[in-house]
Amino acid sequence: MLRALTNIWHITRRELRGFGKRPILLVIMVVAPLGFLWMFTSLMQAGLPTKLPAALVDEDNTHVTRQLTRILATMEETDFVLRTPSFTEARQAMQRGEVYAIFRIPKGTTEAALTQRQPVISFYTNDTYYVAASLLMKDMRKLSEMAGLAITRATMRARGATDDQIMGTLQPIVVEAHPLGNPHLNYSVVLSNLIVPGLLMLVIMLTTSYALGMEWKRGRQLKLYTMAGRKTLVAVVGKLLPQTVLYTIIFWLIDLVFYSYLQFPCHCGVSRMMLWGFMAVLASQGFGLLLYEAFPGQMRMAMSACSLLGVMQFSLAGFSFPVSAMDEPFQWLSNIFPLHHYFLIYVNQALNGYDVSYIWSSVVALVAFFVAPLVFMFRLKDAFLNKEYEP
């Protein structure tokens, strides 16, 4: 045992010296993840896009419609940068990308409503810009509902109804909304907490395959194996230990920025999330090692597989589209990615504050990603002894 620890230490020192000879590797391992952290937290600093450009086409131009458009202009997400009576002009502005939505009130809307005919209010959104279009659609739907209520209020006032009678008719039940987990509806709380760790996990997978593959590329795999006392596990642990320590520190720094500096919701405590972050690092290294064992001595193939599967995990993790709504084969496929299980742990622990018993399967999955390469360690041993680098 003591001999194995000594060999691990010698290999670790060798790896640390190698970092100085390959500064680009440190840039990828340190600068890139911190750059991801800075980019996404600053990009979504406001939490939610505001003052999105839209066009207003008020062909009716009555007191009621002007009041409605003033209300819409006060909404946080909407900014009418173009007001015109011409729908053609507004459409051309949307085609040029100057506005994301058009709100159109056709001529005769107020008159049709007051005479109990059914007027039509139209709104158009450019869904090429999905988030912007969705937020503007929400505001415009709200305004279209308010338009009908405003006209009904005007009609009831003309008939002599009191304000209490009007409000009792228009809104007989008052709804109180209490969003749980993310009460401020801050996009950054969900997206930054998954995209930044997800990108870091992708980098971990790639650098794991790269670090092992470089031994074969430079023809030093047998020397490494000898330094490890001809113990495959000792060689792997010594080789990857510096990366494990460095990535764990970076993951913990990300957690501190999210939960201590930016004050994102964390009902389980920062220390608990740091534990899950450490497990995510080990699971990502295990995933990268597993793929290298599938293509021993073939760094290009192993890194290509890491890239492909690492990018796929963003689509199948469940934070952009719920896994339960996917086709059944994709629901099963989502379980082979570490990011999906980290996402479930984050939602249940940090956002909802549930007990660990709710996430035991995801915790077991992260441990399995770390342990699985041990089963196929014989392939790496064979590669150390018999396999040359394959470009």
Image (cartoon, rainbow, N blue to C red):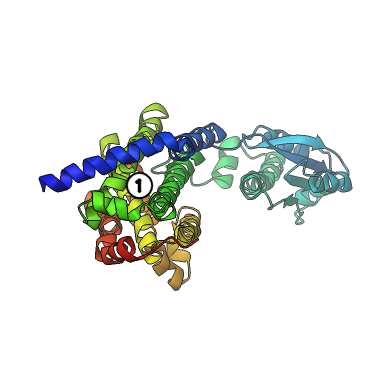
Q: Position of residue 262 (x, y in %)?
A: 42, 29
Asked whether 272 or 325 is in front, the reply is: 272
Q: Answer yes or no: is residue 311 visible.
A: yes
Furthest-left residue in this view: 1
Instruction: Give left or right: position of 65 versus 257.
Output: right
The quadrant holding residue 75 is top right
| Residue indicated by mark 1 | 346
Q: Residues within 10 Å of mark 1 (few under 14, many from 20)?
A: many
Residue 152 position (above or below residue 363): above
The quadrant holding residue 26 is top left
Q: Residue at x 76, y 38 (%)?
A: 64
Q: Residue at x 31, y 40 (%)?
A: 14
Instruction: Give left or right: position of 43 versus 3.
Output: right
Q: Position of residue 358 (x, y in %)?
A: 26, 54
Q: Secondary structure at mark 1?
A: helix
Given the image, on which type of amino acid does mark 1 rest?
A: Tyr
Q: Residue at x 25, y 65 (%)?
A: 375
Furthest-top residue in this view: 261
Instruction: Give left or right: position of 74 versus 370.
Output: right
Q: Position of residue 192 (x, y in %)?
A: 47, 41
Asked whether 40 or 268 is in front, the reply is: 40
Residue 12 position (above or below residue 338): above
Asked whether 247 or 113 is in front, the reply is: 247
Q: Residue at x 72, y 33 (%)?
A: 70
